[in-house]
Amino acid sequence: MDLLSSLPDEVRCHILSFLTTKEAALTSVLSKKWGNLFALVPNLVFDDSEFLHPEEGKRERDGILESFMGFVDTVLALQGNSPIHKFSLKCKDGVCESRLNRWICQVLRRGVSDLDLSIDIIEVYLPQEMFVSKTLVNLKLESTCGIHWWTGAEGTFLPMLKSLCVVSGRIFCGDKLQEMLPACFPVLEDLQMANMEWIDSDETVSSATLTNLLICGFPPQNLKSISFDAPNLISLVYSDLVAEDYPLVNMRNLSLARIVLRTNDDQINRLRGPNNVLLEDDVVHQFGNVVKLMNGIQNVQELHLCPDTLEVLSLCCESLPVFNNVKTLCIYSEDVRGWQAVPALLRNCPHLEILTFEGLVHYVTDKCGDACSCIYRKDKGSSLTTSPVKVVTVKGFGVTMKELNMVEHFLDYFPCLKEMNLYIEEDTLTQLGKNPQVSEILEMIEEYKELYSCKVHLYVSHTSTTQSPFGI
């Protein structure tokens, strides 16, 4: 006896809701009892790449795209006006924009609460109905071609929306965020906007309901100022060119912060020079205002800083706040960016327990010498000896003698260190496998396990462990 077929329709519909709509449709051939049961499923997932299969050239065959669009039309027609919970659509250029907008309007009229659109269609303008829905709770928009928020964005009103994620090559918006957030999204908790094109030189992200914020500005022009007024924010990912000022930063409940400030090589060179080289109106003069941003996030418990951010913080090492709550600090490194701010950060994190490096190689200056072994200084290791760090993790370890010297430096100077974890990427070992120095370094690491009371672990990563601090 077919046990599945004996189940009630609502149970079988629930089972089908975990499948893509194409997979659910295939069950209609099982028996008459299954028939068009898939059309009653409240979750619809359409993916043109899955429908067309990843066969080379199949997309270009006559009638293939029409077949996909016809399938979507048929399923929606079979469902009639039945309630729908989730509608997920992934499609590339070639899908008719008018049919796309008709699908969206159909599911909106049926009370969809979870709308996920990944649309790579050039210059797509989404229907206005989507921006005034009274049922949407989660909205995700993704496109490499650019997304136009409804022209006349002041008309946006999504009273039930709790999660908004917009990931695009560029986001075109008709209004400032400070005008839109409180009025258009009164209960919004999670906001993710990647490649936001600012329409003004001054911006404010203001919301009393936000708990998670990921925001990435689109180059090339930096903001004159940006403020954050989000007192209940728990997680922040902020990526943009360095603004000239951060007038207001109110995020007192922040737990996690990833700060990805971006600069160019010319700005970095001017930043490293003596202050009297900078003209009074030079934007680099204003980089010191980043300390206002750091003051506003000083209650954070986990802090991630990218290479450019570290360089910018070198301008305000003496005025950095004390991060009393930071237990985890993650430092991303590049060979063209320096560690001048690392000693100050270590001294200003008095309760730091976990220190993670995404790469150890960095640009050498005389200001990082007491945190690393690059240059000999009389105060060598001084910022480490006062640190309570218990665990150091190095991801992307390149198996070089220079990096090994830094590992040994950490082992020697961190007084509370209990564990040292080194991650070597499998590709790195393969490329350096014939280098006799690699075997020598690996043997020395094994010896550290005997020489130090700290536990030293060596791991091989089968995939790259170094991730973008932006996280999308």
Image: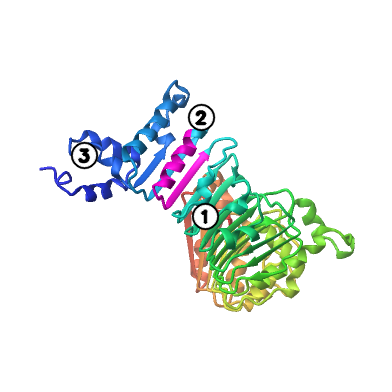
Q: Which residue is label 3 attached to?
A: 34
Label 1 sits on a secondary structure element that is strand
Magenta segment: 99-119
Residue 49 place in picture, x, y as percent: 43, 34
Whole-angstrom CA distance, mark 1 to mark 2, is: 26 Å
Query: From the image, which quarter does the N terminus lie in?
Result: top left
Disc 1 + disc 2, Cβ < 8 Å:
no
Residue 37 place in picture, x, y as percent: 25, 41
Label 2 sits on a secondary structure element that is loop
Is residue 198 shown left or right of residue 115? right
Whole-angstrom CA distance, mark 2 to mark 3, is: 33 Å
Disc 2 + disc 3, Cβ < 8 Å:
no
Q: Is residue 107 magenta?
A: yes
Label 3 sits on a secondary structure element that is loop
Whole-angstrom CA distance, mark 3 to mark 1, is: 36 Å
184 or 87, nearer to the observer: 184
Residue drawn where x is 77% and y is 66% of the image: 288
Q: Which residue is label 1 attached to?
A: 164
Question: Would you place residue 66 above or below residue 356 in this image?
Answer: above
Q: Which residue is label 2 attached to?
A: 94
Question: Would you place residue 32 above or below residue 189 in this image?
Answer: above
Q: Amino acid at mark 2?
A: Gly
